[in-house]
Image (tube, helix red, strand yellow):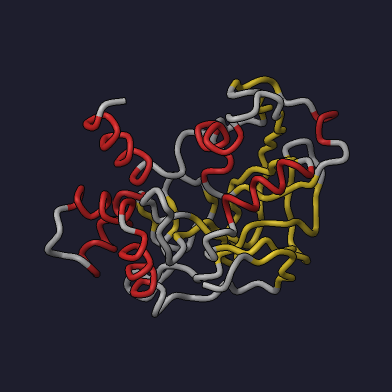
Amino acid sequence: MNTTDSRTHRLHRARNYPYDFPLRSYTYDNGEIKDFDTSLTAQRTPVLAIGSNQAPERLVQKFGHDATHIIPVQRAQLNGFDVVFSAHISNYGAVPAMLQTSAGSTVSIAVTWLNDEQLEIMHATEIAAANYWFAELQEISVLLDDGAVHSQACAYLSSRGHLNIASSPVALSAIGCNARSYPAMTTGEALEHVRQRVAPDLDADQFVHQLVEDRDYRRQVITMISADSGEFAHPMRIVRAGPTA
């Protein structure tokens, strides 16, 4: 990949989060999308996938180094929540997702069924930067597309809180939600809001490149946008936390 292609790919990763994902259950198998097989879920941990973890493109980035990884990804509906932007920036320049309570809403998510090795790989990609906790939620309602209902589940929950825009959480427009009560944006629009807030003199593309290339700068931006963030509003039990932010 030449320099121009690399920079174009970087902008795609930042602005097109959470990427394309099937609206049906599927099995990730060495980068291929295959039919969902419920028998493959046995002896695995169900983990809510609310953002890019439901997208094959992101699973390839995390698990593509090993052709043996097979991951069932099952569609689900989560009652009483929505998927909103977290008050942080990923190392690839996106404003990523978090769950937030939303009375009366039902958000479309997925469940990734992970074995122990896959769970450790996912932990390394999610909690190492101190932006998420791996936590257990109870007294919830997760309706899987096979009709099963779970009242508890694990998920990666933002330790930074939700991004506030005009004093409100903002939902990801790429994620379907019935009876959505929050305003919604694309990730590109959320990034532009952040740029106007913290670096209005920077060109939009250059802002993304600096976020990716300069870790200290990215941390400064995270500090600024998380200063007025809103905390996750449902009780949780932290199972695994990353380093101190």
User: Which is more toward the observer, 60 or 45?
Assistant: 60
Residue at 59% across / 46% down in the picture?
108
Q: Quadrant of residue 225?
A: bottom left
Q: Quadrant of the N terminus?
A: top left
Q: Is residue 37 left or right of residue 208?
A: right
Q: How far from the left and from the top, in percent, is residue 38?
A: 81, 30
Hey, which quadrant is residue 151 in on the image? bottom right
Residue at image position (74%, 63%) is 136
Residue 157 image point, x, y percent: 60, 63
Residue positioned 52% across, 61% down in the render? 129
* Residue at the (41%, 74%) spot, across then down: 226
Seen as rendered, the residue at the extreme left is 201
**Camera-side residue of 223 and 65:** 65
Q: How many marks?
A: 0
Residue 190, image quadrant = bottom left
Q: At which x and y percent is residue 150?
A: 80, 52
Q: Position of residue 159 (x, y in %)?
A: 55, 69
Q: Residue furthest right?
A: 43
Viewer-proximal residue among 33 and 61:
61
- The vertical placement of 34 against 7, above or below, is above
* Above or below for 108 versus 66: below
